[in-house]
Amino acid sequence: MPLPKLNAPFDRVPTTGLRGQFGPYLATESLVHAANTALGLGLPLLLTGEPGSGKSDFAWVVAHALGLEAPLRCQVRSGTTAKELLYHFDALVRFADAQHGDRERSREPRHYVTLQPLGLALMSKARQVVLIDEIDKAPRDLPNDLLWELDEGSFEISEVSDVDESTQIFDDKLPGVPLQRRMQRPGGAERPLLVITSNSERQLPDAFLRRCVFFHIPSPSDSDLVKIARERFPNEPLKLVTSLVEIFAALRRVERLTKPPSTSELLNWLEAMTRIYDRDEVQMAVDAFESALKRGKGALSIKGYQHWSALPGLQCLIKLREDLDSLTPPKPRGA
């Protein structure tokens, strides 16, 4: 059954002709539908999926499709707080100014405030796309700490006094919005679109999930991988690209792998095979592996695993030592 059409003006992102940070991006109709729903409702778009599935790159897809600048990116770490996504207050520089520098300037704390990506987007009059990457790495309180800011479009700079703000001071990146204790989104400003990614390392709070439009990017099928590869490498021979993807897909099906290679690792491998390695040697390897796979060796059976250790560019695909060992033939005794 086809997805229902979204009424204008919310149907903003097309399903074809999409481009990410690194080139063409093949998005399913369902993913685009989720993005347009998030745009129309003014809610964050929460994306999950295996690492390398294109979650982060989709922020660039949306920004490009809407004719906006590159996304403002918030890199989340294990100790990140909600405040750090909104603004930074440089207390050390202020202290230095008060002790040995510009003491007059140090009396006004707004001189030491710098808006961070989420704070800039909330205060911008024009729509911005914000990428909050790998939010599941942050402390559990961070998603809930952002609920008020996301709902109300405002936040508080606690280091700034709420009195004597007659002299306007601005952030260099947002000269039209004065810095003050209560930062409020300008009237008529469009809500930013937040693209939030998670690797599902832990469950996000229910209150936060209720305020998101959710989409899980599934692992691409073998035919989807061929389409993605053809879009990224349009000038390479179709037969070569298709054969390389088939070899990659067979490698992913080796049961002993702890970490099967992802789509992004496939693209790195394809680039190495088509632009770095000698073309004749690549073709010889392709012919040998295709022949082995047709004989049933190396695809699903462990008996033929020794073939994989000779695959050119295997370093682009296998990232764990135990996986590499499982694809390497045992050394003869006494060797």
Image (spheres, helix red, strand yellow):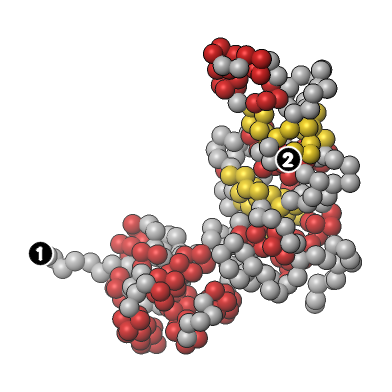
Residue 335: horizontal and vertical position, in percent? 12, 65
Q: Residues within 10 Å of mark 1 (few under 14, many from 20)?
A: few
Helix or strand or loop: what does disc 1 sit on? loop
The disc placed on residue 15 is: none
Q: Residues within 10 Å of mark 2 (few under 14, many from 20)?
A: some
The part of the image, by quadrant, that contains residue 13 is: bottom right
Residue 127: horizontal and vertical position, in percent? 78, 51
Q: Earlier in the sequence, mark 1 or mark 2?
A: 2
Q: Is residue 252 left or right of 127 when viewed as pictured?
A: left
The reply to whether the C-beta atoms of the residues labelled 1 and 2 are less than 8 Å apart is no
Residue 179: horizontal and vertical position, in percent? 76, 30
Comparing labels 1 and 2, the label whose residue is closer to the camera: 2
Q: How many marks?
A: 2
Residue 253: horizontal and vertical position, in percent? 46, 72
Q: Which residue is mark 2?
A: 174
- State whether residue 43 appears in this view: no
Q: Quadrant of the N terminus?
A: bottom right
Q: Which residue is mark 1?
A: 334
The part of the image, by quadrant, that contains residue 248 is: bottom left
Q: Is residue 170 left or right of 190 when viewed as pictured?
A: left
Q: Is residue 298 left or right of 215 when viewed as pictured?
A: left
Residue drawn at point x = 81 percent, y = 18 percent: 164
* Label 1, label 2: how far apart the Cα atoms are: 70 Å
Helix or strand or loop: what does disc 2 sit on? strand
Residue drawn at point x = 74 percent, y = 62 percent: 67
Identify whether 45 is placed above or below 13.
Answer: above
Residue 105 or residue 190, whichever sits in front: 105
Residue drawn at point x = 58 percent, y = 68 percent: 23
Identify whether 10 is placed above or below 123.
Answer: below
Mark 1: which amino acid? Gly
- State whether residue 239 appears in this view: yes
